[in-house]
Image (cartoon, helix red, strand yellow):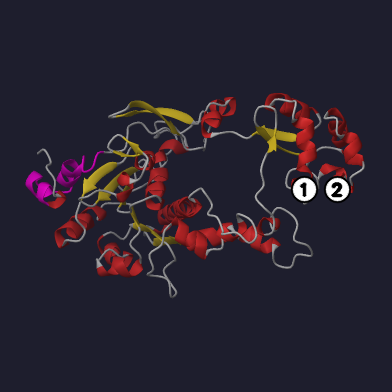
């Protein structure tokens, strides 16, 4: 069904949670980025048809597993429909093109040259569906000498300078642990798709939106590089990461905390030093000047003077330390583990966890999208689909017989 804006009276719930309910998204991407893009569209109400090769999306085989598939695949593909098509065959590509004739958004990770070779470029597809929006993710972009190079998270992080600001001078660089290339690219592509949908309301025509992982990482990096342009001294959070060892939290009696005195007054700063029993030593050390801003948090000498702070914190539990620090106008939080952050009161207050039924494991907790519109949190019920679970129904609706769906999917499909 073509997308149209629904008035508040026409919507079952007048929030963004179902704003895209009339959209059909066809996603042929594999792995993380494209799947994350279509997941966000699904959270906003769109129907998502995930096209998989006969062996399935390779993300199904990532570690760690949850039953038959990986935890990553489960997290990124809940609420979608799985259709198996072999896009290396003309019949598989013909079936895909038939689905795209009535689709609103087409998510791919083919690259421009391969898409054109397969007849899946926007110029070709828009002949049958001028309203189609093609959303493409590539490692290095549509142009330039690297346009056809394959790339993964680590490859593109290295190409975009990210590992150089982690670790210590003279030692090998270290990757950023989170998949920031994959995830940022998906978020940027989602924004581009929403812009294309908005423009289509006035023009009636779709377009191709493309995002490169390298471009996404460089765009995200701009604050660091701006600070590095002509620094008088290499200090401050945006430059010193290239020059200083890794930063660690402040040890307490039973754990670790992080705190900063950005908003505390000088009187509060000295009061905290006194309460911790380290005021006399701090007053003899010129590094503790500047109202505490240089000697704690991301201050330029914070790591050098950390042993003195930890001497004052050694007899306090993390809860006691945080209560004391906050009473003097400082900002502080415990350094959480995966388990403790999910069990925290703040996560519960934000209502970020949602229980979903897994076909093999029963009820499992999942993380919701973090947005709230009119106070409503979007919820996706249902697990990720089994491989090819919707091949027969989707292809039947597109005009194929059960036998044809069986041949196209190369798997047994109940008629």
Residue 230 as seen in the image, left or right of residue 50? right
SS at circle 2: helix
Q: Quadrant of the C terminus?
A: top left
Numbered tag placed on residue 287 in the rendering: 2
Q: Is residue 146 left or right of residue 323?
A: left
Residue drawn at x 83%, y 42% is 292
Q: CA distance from mark 2 to mark 1?
A: 9 Å
Tell me, yes or no, whether the highlighted magenta stretch contains residue 404: yes
Residue in view at x 23 percent, y 52 percent: 53
Foreground pick, 20 / 42: 42
What range of the chain is rendered magenta? Answer: 386-407
- The correct choice, above or below, for 32 with respect to 359 in the image is below
Count residues near mark 2 (Cα–Cα under 10 Å), then give few for <14, some for 14-19, many for 20+. some
Image coordinates for residue 104, horizontal then vertical, percent: 33, 52
Residue 136 coordinates in the image, percent (x, y) = 38, 59
Q: Nearer the viewer, residue 276 or 315?
A: 315
Q: Which residue is mark 1?
A: 304
Q: Position of residue 408 (x, y in %)?
A: 14, 52
Task: Point out residue 178 in the picture as x, y percentages from the top left corner.
Answer: 50, 48
Q: Nearer the viewer, residue 295 or 137?
A: 295
The residue lying furthest to the left in this view is 403
Helix, strand or loop for disc 1: helix
Pair 2/1: label in front: 1
Marks 1 and 2: in contact by CB < 8 Å? yes
């Amino acid at each position: 069904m073509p997308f149209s804006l629904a008035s508040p009276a026409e919507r079952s719930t007048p929030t963004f949670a179902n704003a895209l309910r009339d959209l059909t998204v066809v996603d042929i991407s594999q792995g993380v980025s494209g799947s994350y893009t279509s997941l966000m569209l699904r959270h906003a109400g769109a129907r998502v048809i995930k096209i998989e090769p006969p062996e399935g999306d390779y993300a199904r085989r990532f570690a760690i597993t949850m039953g038959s598939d990986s935890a990553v695949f489960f997290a990124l593909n809940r609420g979608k429909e799985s259709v198996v098509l072999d896009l290396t065959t003309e019949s598989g590509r013909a079936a895909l093109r038939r689905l795209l004739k009535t689709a609103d958004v087409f998510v791919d990770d083919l690259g421009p040259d391969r898409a054109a070779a397969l007849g899946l470029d926007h110029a070709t597809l828009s002949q049958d569906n001028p309203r189609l929006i093609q959303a493409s993710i590539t490692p290095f972009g549509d142009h330039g000498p690297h346009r056809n190079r394959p790339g993964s998270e680590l490859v593109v992080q290295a190409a975009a300078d990210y590992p150089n600001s982690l670790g210590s001078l003279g030692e090998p660089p270290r990757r950023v642990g989170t998949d920031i290339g994959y995830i940022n690219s998906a978020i940027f592509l989602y924004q581009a798709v929403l812009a294309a949908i908005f423009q289509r309301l006035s023009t009636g025509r779709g377009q191709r939106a493309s995002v490169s992982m390298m471009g996404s990482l460089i765009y995200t990096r701009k604050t660091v590089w701006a600070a590095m342009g002509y620094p008088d001294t290499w200090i401050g959070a945006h430059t010193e990461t290239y020059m200083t060892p890794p930063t660690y939290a402040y040890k307490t009696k039973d754990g670790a905390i992080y705190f900063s005195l950005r908003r505390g007054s000088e009187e509060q700063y000295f009061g905290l030093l006194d309460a911790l029993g380290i005021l006399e030593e701090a007053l003899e050390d010129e590094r503790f000047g500047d109202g505490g801003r240089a000697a704690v948090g991301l201050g330029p000498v914070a790591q050098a003077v950390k042993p003195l702070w930890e001497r004052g914190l050694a007899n306090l539990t993390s809860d006691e330390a945080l209560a004391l620090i906050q009473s003097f106008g400082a900002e502080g939080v415990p350094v959480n583990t995966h388990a403790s952050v999910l069990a925290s009161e703040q996560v519960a207050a934000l209502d970020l966890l949602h229980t979903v039924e897994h076909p093999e494991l029963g009820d499992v907790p999942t993380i919701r999208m973090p947005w709230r519109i009119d106070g409503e949190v979007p919820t996706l019920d249902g697990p990720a689909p089994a491989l090819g679970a919707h091949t027969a129904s989707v292809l039947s609706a597109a005009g194929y017989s059960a036998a044809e769906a069986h041949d196209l999917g190369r798997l047994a499909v109940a008629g």
